[in-house]
Amino acid sequence: MTQDQIILFCLFGAVFGLLLWGRFRYDIVAFSALLVGVLLGVVPEKDAFSGFGHPATLVVALVLVVSAGLVRSGAVFLITRTLVDSSRSLGAHITLMGGIGGVLSAFMNNVAALALLMPVDVQTARKAGRSPGLSLMPLSFATILGGMATLIGTPPNIIIASIREESLGEPFKMFDFAPVGGITAIAGLVFVALIGWRLIPKREDAGQTLSDITEYIAELTVPEDSKHIGKRLFELEETAAKTDVAILGLSRDGRRRYGSARNTALQAHDTLILEAAPDALDEFRAALSLNFSDEKREEALKAAGEGLDVIEVVVSETSRITGRTAERVGLAWRQGAVLMGLSRQGKRITKQLRKTEVKTGDILLLLVPKDRGADITDWLGCLPLADRGLAVTADKKVWLAIGLFAGAVIAAALGIVYLPIALGLVVMAYVLTKIVPLSELYTHIEWPVVVLLGSMIPLGAALERVGGTELIAGTLVDLTQGLPAWTILTVLMLVTMTLSDVLNNTATTIVAAPVGIQMAQSLGVSPDPFLMAVAIAASSAFLTPIGHKNNTLILGPGGYKFSDYWRIGLPLEVLVVVVSIPSILIFWPL
């Protein structure tokens, strides 16, 4: 081994040792290793920060913004209402989401499949009162597994098809990967759904439960053009149940109706009296296309064009609004704010919200102009609650958001537009159409994850440049001399998996596929089973968050530690080898 190879192998060993230890955050460890590599001369200075402009890093950052746009537009609510039930057991939920993710990722880029389903999973976890970390990793693994079944499902399959064309004169076709990849994916999905998720560590602080969230008495109004006019109030209860909203009654012409209102036919400008948490209230409003109770003020806020924020404040004894109503204090015309909801624990509210006298200890849910929450809180003399990332769903843009995302995925799948460019166009379209407010464009990116990827990519490239990967490949060829074909296939898969867990799976495929062809030629057998082995193994990066972009995407939202991945990933990789080797020998005989 050369000196540079020894230095890089030691650096990688130190990085993974520190990451498994978990004492220091992963981005600090990775960035420190990059700087040490530059100082020791194994990473060229001009390439030190090339990883931050690498397509993999950009895709991760862009996907997080696209996911936020799908949430803000109501697209995620649409999927959760249609397909997902938060009352399902965790195992049943993972089975359903994993199945959907596996099928989608077979026909679209598996990063895009996860981008679509990740916010759905997080939203369902919130409604179920559990940590998203219990289901995000199974979902990520399911989308990785599903990509094995087709040519376009994952980049390694596309690369192997092109290498086969260069070496043998003909590429693999669209569904040539299906027999082996499909069987392996199904076996992996069954494991993840039945056993894998039980291996994920449970953490008390990993997510906020519904019991921690204040529920408000709130009002929403039926607009003039609503499709629900003429329906009975009880016909809305199914949607209310799915969104965790309680319908308390109905207000018409200033008079409230409670128990008798269930059979009342809805009219324009009727006000629904509800009890719900802020997110649930917004989801219910978006699902039924209802208005806030102060329709005129809502329209004025929208016309301002700067966007809306939702804030929560606690009323103190010295607050301007104490002992007065929102209407009397001039909340709307003085500050341009709308009272969305009021929480008064244990006490019933019998008047319209804006005409209800506010008392000390009440919690107010306010709709305010963008970035004016702090000013309005100070003006009221109230105390702000901790920011929980509440937002107003732009429900009238749901199909626009879905259409833009679907168009980008189709264009990328057909090779019309490069995936990072396609996602970048979606992000810009979301900003221009105000699906994602400009002020929030960068707040949705998990910057520690970006630093992790941006730091590790130059180190991986340096290892390849100094011949480290070729050294591994050459050693592999020497060690397998004289062994049975199935044993050689197994060794090739294990080494390829190991490389894929450390390096980008694209780089791993480029190195491992020629090695597989060379092995087949030395044995005098067909290279196809060896290429299939590389294809499955390169996509089976389950041990670390840096082996596959999907694993990197869930690192922040799932609240995972670096060491969490191998708990479910190690037995899954063993299962992949056990299932895929016989499948390869049956469908692609030597």
Image: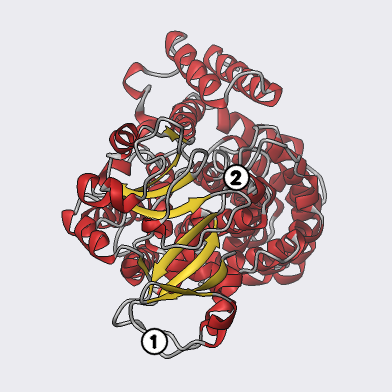
- Which residue is tagged 2? 515
Front in this rendered view, residue 231 or 559: 231
Q: How is the image coloured?
A: secondary structure
User: Position of 567 compared to 246: left or right?
Assistant: right
Q: Amino acid at mark 2?
A: Val
Rendered location of residue 576, percent (x, y)? 74, 55
Q: Is residue 535 visible?
A: no
Residue at image position (36%, 55%) is 419
Which label sits on residue 229? 1
| Pointer 1 with pointer 2, Cβ within 8 A | no
Residue at image position (60%, 45%) is 515
User: Position of 50 compared to 169: left or right?
Assistant: left
The mark closer to the camera, 1 or 2, is 1
Q: Residues within 10 Å of mark 2 (few under 14, many from 20)?
A: many
Q: Amino acid at mark 1?
A: Ile
Q: Is residue 204 visible?
A: yes
